[in-house]
Image (tube, helix red, strand yellow):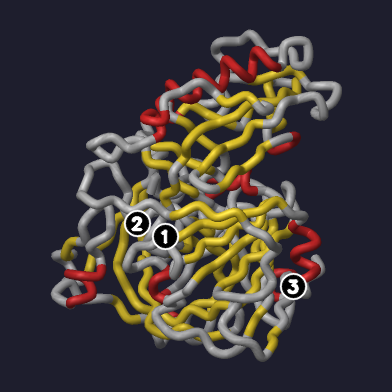
């Protein structure tokens, strides 16, 4: 959500590749070499590809695109559909893809079936560029940023395996986020939701998984089905819309949030507040493109009140009504002596629970010359988002599995550094 709050079209070859994804403003994939300092190992096994990444603000992956190949870095975003790259050199961009240098680059005509039918899941309908008669696409995000350009096909090389004919947006106007500095670090975005143009759909992936280590550390991305996931996983089913609703994103990874606990105390809220209404507002999305977790106003206020009550004498709140971190997180504290006494917050889903504690619960930020710690749940209402969003900060040291065949999301707490080592990667 820095994403869109917003497998491969080809069968994967019979090899397993270990790749490291950098968690910054993108995720990185490599092979049995060390592209971008991320070694890849190949094994004669069925589809799974293993990638590792480093973590800071967003999840990022490095790969090559085009013929001859050009190095690019892309944000891994389960909340977006269309993958895209900056294709026009701008002063604030450090990395772009140049289609003029690639013999395999193929722009999509606007009268083609791909432009007229495959773009059906995009939030903004594709149009015809009157100047060149090519398929024109626009993507927009919750922070009001956007990018637009031409739908095209190109050869993507993920984990050393070429995927010719992969559809993506070759953008000549920039803006994945409203932060110019963050945009400058990456070449584009890798859309991983369930839409017809997402990389997951184009790759025909049965499932994919990732495990995010602590900040500025490495994690693992696994594309395909493999035996390496920690077990047992807790599973919660994916929710699908039976009717079309204006605010319901039907290609998102939507799960059913049923309640929230502070320590072991369940918030006294009617279950109806977690159920999407007739407009689709109120769905719960798992989004790797959003850093923190956001709750609709009434639920956020209830959680905030209970957390304040249980942390009396433990945390000292900053009483500054003008200080709101990230525009939606208004509960911040002076540096605590220890996080051990801070009560955990547990998200209760249908069939599964996700426990958030310690550093995942309070995030260190700067306030002038002071360092303060802000509660990592925010108010969706302050962002103008009609949804609950589970961001990647609360997925740290949690193995996350997206099972497209069985239509479910699985997760379990683990140590992601050890998971990386178990998969054969050592940062």
Q: Which residue is mark 1?
A: 193
Residue name at image x 72 percent, y 47 percent: 215
- As measured in the structure, the alpha-carbon distance from the residue carrying label 3 to the one carrying label 1 is 25 Å
Mark 3 element type: loop
Question: Residue 398: x, y in percent?
Answer: 67, 52
Q: Are marks 1 and 2 in contact (CB under 8 Å)?
A: yes
Quadrant for residue 323, please give it.
top right
Q: Residues within 10 Å of mark 1 (few under 14, many from 20)?
A: many
Q: Residues within 10 Å of mark 3 (few under 14, many from 20)?
A: some
Residue name at image x 23 percent, y 36 percent: 278
In the rendered image, the residue lying farthest to the right is: 337
- As measured in the structure, the alpha-carbon distance from the residue carrying label 2 to the one carrying label 3 is 30 Å
Name the foreground residue: 46 vs 391: 46
Mark 2 element type: loop
Q: Which residue is mark 3?
A: 423
Any mark on residue 357, and which? none
Question: Residue 381: x, y in percent?
Answer: 40, 26
Residue name at image x 41 percent, y 55 percent: 80
- As measured in the structure, the alpha-carbon distance from the residue carrying label 1 to the one carrying label 2 is 6 Å
Q: Which residue is mark 2?
A: 251
Upstream in the sequence, badge 3 or badge 1?
1
Q: How many marks?
A: 3
Residue 327 visible in the snapshot: no
Residue name at image x 37 percent, y 69 percent: 168
């Amino acid at each position: 959500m820095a994403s869109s709050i917003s497998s491969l079209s080809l069968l994967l070859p019979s090899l397993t590749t270990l790749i490291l994804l950098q968690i910054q403003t993108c995720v990185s994939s490599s092979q049995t070499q060390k592209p971008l300092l991320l070694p890849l190992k190949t094994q004669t096994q069925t589809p799974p590809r293993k990638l590792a990444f480093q973590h800071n603000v967003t999840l990022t992956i490095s790969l090559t695109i085009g013929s001859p190949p050009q190095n690019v870095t892309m944000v891994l975003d389960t909340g977006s559909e269309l993958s895209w790259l900056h294709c026009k050199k701008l002063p604030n961009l450090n990395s772009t893809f140049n289609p003029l240098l690639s013999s395999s680059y193929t722009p999509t005509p606007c009268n083609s079936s791909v432009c007229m039918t495959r773009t059906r899941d995009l939030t903004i309908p594709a149009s015809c560029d009157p100047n060149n008669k090519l398929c024109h696409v626009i993507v927009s995000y919750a922070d009001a940023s956007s990018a637009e350009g031409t739908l095209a096909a190109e050869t993507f090389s993920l984990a050393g395996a070429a995927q010719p004919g992969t559809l993506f947006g070759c953008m000549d106007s920039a803006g994945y986020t409203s932060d110019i500095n963050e945009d400058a670090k990456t070449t584009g975005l890798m859309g991983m939701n369930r839409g017809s143009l997402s990389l997951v759909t184009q790759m025909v992936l049965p499932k994919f998984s990732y495990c995010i280590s602590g900040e500025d550390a490495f994690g693992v991305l696994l594309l395909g089905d493999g035996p390496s996931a920690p077990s047992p996983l807790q599973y919660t089913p994916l929710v699908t819309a039976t009717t079309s609703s204006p605010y319901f994103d039907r290609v998102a990874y939507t799960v059913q949030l049923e309640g929230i606990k502070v320590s072991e105390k369940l918030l006294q809220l009617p279950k109806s507040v977690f159920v999407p209404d007739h407009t689709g507002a109120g769905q719960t999305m798992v989004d790797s493109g959003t850093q923190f977790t956001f709750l609709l106003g009434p639920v956020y206020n209830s959680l905030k009140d209970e957390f304040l009550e249980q942390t009396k004498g433990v945390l000292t709140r900053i009483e500054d009504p003008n200080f709101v971190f990230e525009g939606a997180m208004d509960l911040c504290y002076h540096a605590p002596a220890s996080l051990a006494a801070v009560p955990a917050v547990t998200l209760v889903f249908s069939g599964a629970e996700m426990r958030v504690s310690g550093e995942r619960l309070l995030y260190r930020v700067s306030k002038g010359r002071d360092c303060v710690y802000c509660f990592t749940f925010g108010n969706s209402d302050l962002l103008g988002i009609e949804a609950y969003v589970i961001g990647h900060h609360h997925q740290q040291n949690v193995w996350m599995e997206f099972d497209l065949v069985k239509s479910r999301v699985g997760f379990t707490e683990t140590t992601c550094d050890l998971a990386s080592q178990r998969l054969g990667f050592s940062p």
